[in-house]
Image (cartoon, rainbow, N blue to C red):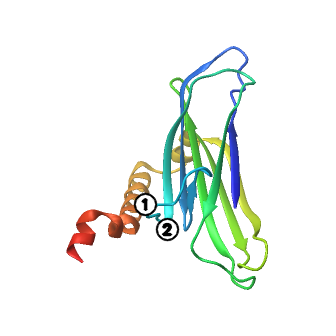
């Protein structure tokens, strides 16, 4: 499934420097369309890229990706995917967008998706300020461990042991 996104600077007078972004995705991989899949992990992805050295007003950064999975779902059982995109720069705070999609389809039909949830362009500090410090740290640690557990079998050490 094709995905495209843009990063805009909405300030007419402040040019943001060193704009970066990160894309986290569950259950699927997200790749650039001109790349080939070599030993892909289709259980999720973590992309971190530099977008631009300087992002001027009204001159957006644009990127295209493809959402890939090895699983084909039937219309009776949709696959749910969560995508989180974070964007920041040298002087700007982290801005987050979250998406939850349900994807339907099989090899003989077109893929169809439904946007179940969309929460765009909120500051990370707004979300983290809602949680108590202890709760925030515990949530982060659980998420980090879950991410590591999902990727464990892809590491050379794991392959060597089994």
Question: Which callout, 1 or 2, points at the residue further toward the start of the chain?
Answer: 2
Pick whichever, 106 or 17, lies toward us.
Answer: 106
- Image quadrant holding the N terminus, namely bottom right
Label drawn at residue 43: 2
Pick whichever, 16 or 141, lies toward us.
Answer: 16
Looking at the image, is 110 positioned above or below residue 143? below
Q: In this figure, what is the number of numbered marks? A: 2
The quadrant where residue 62 appears: top right
Pinpoint residue 105: horizontal percent, then vertical percent.
74, 76
Which SS class for mark 1? helix
Looking at the image, is 81 positioned above or below residue 13? below
Q: Which residue corresponds to the image point at 38% horizontal and 65% vertical from the top-left? A: 151
Q: Which residue corresponds to the image point at 77% horizontal and 66% vertical from the top-left? A: 114
Q: Residues within 10 Å of mark 2 (few under 14, many from 20)?
A: some
* Residue with the most extreme top position: 13
Image side of residue 153 versus residue 102, left or right:
left
Q: Which residue corresponds to the image point at 73% horizontal and 85% vertical from the top-left? A: 76
Q: Which residue corresponds to the image point at 75% horizontal and 70% vertical from the top-left? A: 111
Pinpoint residue 42: horizontal percent, then vertical percent.
51, 67
Q: Real-space Cα distance between discs 1 and 2?
A: 15 Å
Pick whichever, 42 or 107, lies toward us.
Answer: 107
Label drawn at residue 143: 1
């Amino acid at each position: 499934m094709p995905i495209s996104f843009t990063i805009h600077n909405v300030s007419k007078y402040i040019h943001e420097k060193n704009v970066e972004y990160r894309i986290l995705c569950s259950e699927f991989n997200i790749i650039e369309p001109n790349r080939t899949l070599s030993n892909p992990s289709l259980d999720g992805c973590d992309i971190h890229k530099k977008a631009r050295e300087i992002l001027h007003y009204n001159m957006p950064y644009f990127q295209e990706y493809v959402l890939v999975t090895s699983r084909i779902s039937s219309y009776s059982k949709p696959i749910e995917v969560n995508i989180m995109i974070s964007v920041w720069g040298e002087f700007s705070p982290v801005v987050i967008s979250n998406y939850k999609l349900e994807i339907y389809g099989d090899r003989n039909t077109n893929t169809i998706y439904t946007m179940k949830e969309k929460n765009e362009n909120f500051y990370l500090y707004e979300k983290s300020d809602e949680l108590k410090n202890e709760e925030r740290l515990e949530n982060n640690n659980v998420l980090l461990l879950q991410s590591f557990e999902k990727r464990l079998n892809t590491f050379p050490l794991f392959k060597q042991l089994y």
